[in-house]
Image (cartoon, helix red, strand yellow):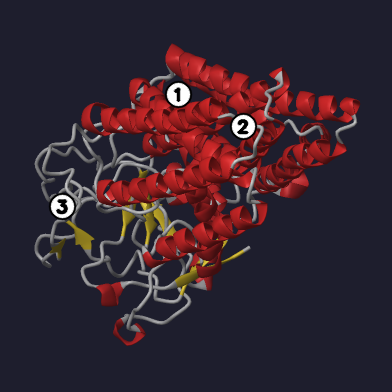
Amino acid sequence: MAAKSDGAAVSLQNETPPLCLPGPEHSSPQHHHAGKRYSLLDCCWTLCALLVFFSDGASDLWLAADYFLRGNYWCFAPTLVFVVVPSLVVQVLSFRWFAYDFSDTNGSDTAAAAVVAASGADSHFSTKGSDQRGAGRSAAAEALPATGSRTRAQSCCRACVWLFQSLVHILQLAQVWRYVHALYLGVQSRWRGDHEQRHYHWRLMFESADISMLRLLEIFLKSAPQLVLQLCIMVQANQVLPLQGLSASASLISLAWMMASYQKALRDSRDDKQPMTYKAAVVQMLWHLFTVGARTMAFALFASIFQLYFGIFIVAHWCAMTFWIIQGETDFCMSKWEEIIYNMMVGIIYVFCWFSVREGPTRCRLVLYSLIVLAENMALTTAWFLYRGPRTSDFYAVVVVCVVACSYALGSFFMFVYYCLLHPDGPVTGGVLGCCMEETAVAPAEPFVPSPASGPPPDVVSSPPRTLQRTKGVDRGDQAGEGGGDVFQVRPAPCSTRKPAPLLSPRTEGPVIRIDLPRKKYPAWDAHFIDRRLRKTILVLESAAPVTPRVQYRCLGTPKELMEYETTV
């Protein structure tokens, strides 16, 4: 993807964009995820994820084959559709990512500039102006070999990689390959030297992010609908076949596992958030396991009697949740239309469980959502209890209602355990649980404008690039410069004598990638996890630089300084 800005890009040679004092949004915290070593627990977590993936897919295919052999084609068709269609969607998306990542980077100005900066070139690089672009390409000509100079062996090797990846995706094994590749990168990051360890760790974080996004999409296109379908079949038939129970259990575990795994991968990727421990991840998995179990059971009970009204209910709930998400002004994607599609997808997730999409009073919104879901579950289960068929005895009906209620209560208990004892940001006090109070956060620092005598402030961010924030409601007349500037430039680090703020030890040496747009806020992914062009720049720079590259972002003091931008593919 390529991003362009409607505002003016700040020239590296002539002016310095306004920067902020070190604060929670523009500086690195005390912990650095890039320095975390790959542990045995990380390896076991990935292996368990592989086991969950195989059990979910294999049980669904086994059940579909059993339906076909029994001649139950009405159950066979939807069961197979919920396996094949989501898998094809995920494979296409994964192969598209691979094709972009594996394509040549020699034509990219930013990749060439990264090598120039990493090699310690004295000239500054900027994507603003044709003369500077030409200088950047000529300076990097020796660092990056031309595409035409590739040897026959290299071409043959690339062709084999393309063939292997095509075969993997045709066989619907993209997720398996990415899990295996993540294991390989993790082991390499532990065995290699210091510099190679950082490089492999960055690639591991990129791969983990890709796996989390792909699997999250897959479970809500496959596992969640499959779970509701099988529960509905069991309720209508008034019996539970062993394969049906196995398939439903595997789908539920897969859904709960990926919700916890996604949150853990997201927190591990950001250096402005504390990482999630495995104990917290397990408790969060239990939270989603029981709440989603109760939710899907209520869906199945209601759908077994009121098929038409169930469809109306799902559509109405999805529309309400999507509107609620849009009103919250999420900032995940890099264009307006991508953001709308993302909000619609999150609306599907909200049909089944809670999913944090923006920063703010999360616990207040979570309590409100939990109360809505509780009321819906009670209404759906009560409707089934009152209008159930004559074959369902009163004792069986009471047991089913108690199972739904106890499951949701147990899930709520684990939710409180997670937030009160195991939340990465610390335990929750009684006052914070109130809906009128916002989540504990550090107030942002006031913008810092350097004086001419003091010189430019130092770079305080020592992590990979952050996401380029999409903003709105700006006054273009107050923006300086001409439109059409580039989003980021790469340059060597400037010298500075200004002392850093307390509790921070920013580095002042090494290459710097400057992004002339603000970062997104948690829970959005950083830019280098979404914009794959930035990934190429980061990896080229990291592989060539003797030290980990630093990143400098524009700190915006007023909303009028925000710049709109759009992305093109």
Q: Quadrant of the C terminus?
A: bottom right
Q: Is residue 199 above or below residue 507?
A: above
**Mark 3 or mark 1: which comes first in sequence?**
1
- Identify which residue is drawn at 21% across, 68% down: 557
* Quadrant of the rendered image containing residue 314: bottom right
Q: Which residue is mark 1?
A: 197
* Element type at mark 3: loop
| Crowd rating for badge 2 (residues with CA inside 10 Å; few <14, some 14–19, many 20+) | few
* Element type at mark 1: helix
> Which of labels 2 and 1 is toward the front?
2
- Residue type, numbered disc 1: Gln
Q: Which residue is at the front of the view, 351 or 541? A: 351
- In the rendering, at what x and y percent does residue 212 appear? 53, 37
- In the rendering, at what x and y percent does residue 488 appear? 43, 60
**Mark 2 or mark 3: which comes first in sequence?**
2
Q: Is residue 407 above or below residue 513?
A: above
Q: Which residue is mark 3?
A: 437
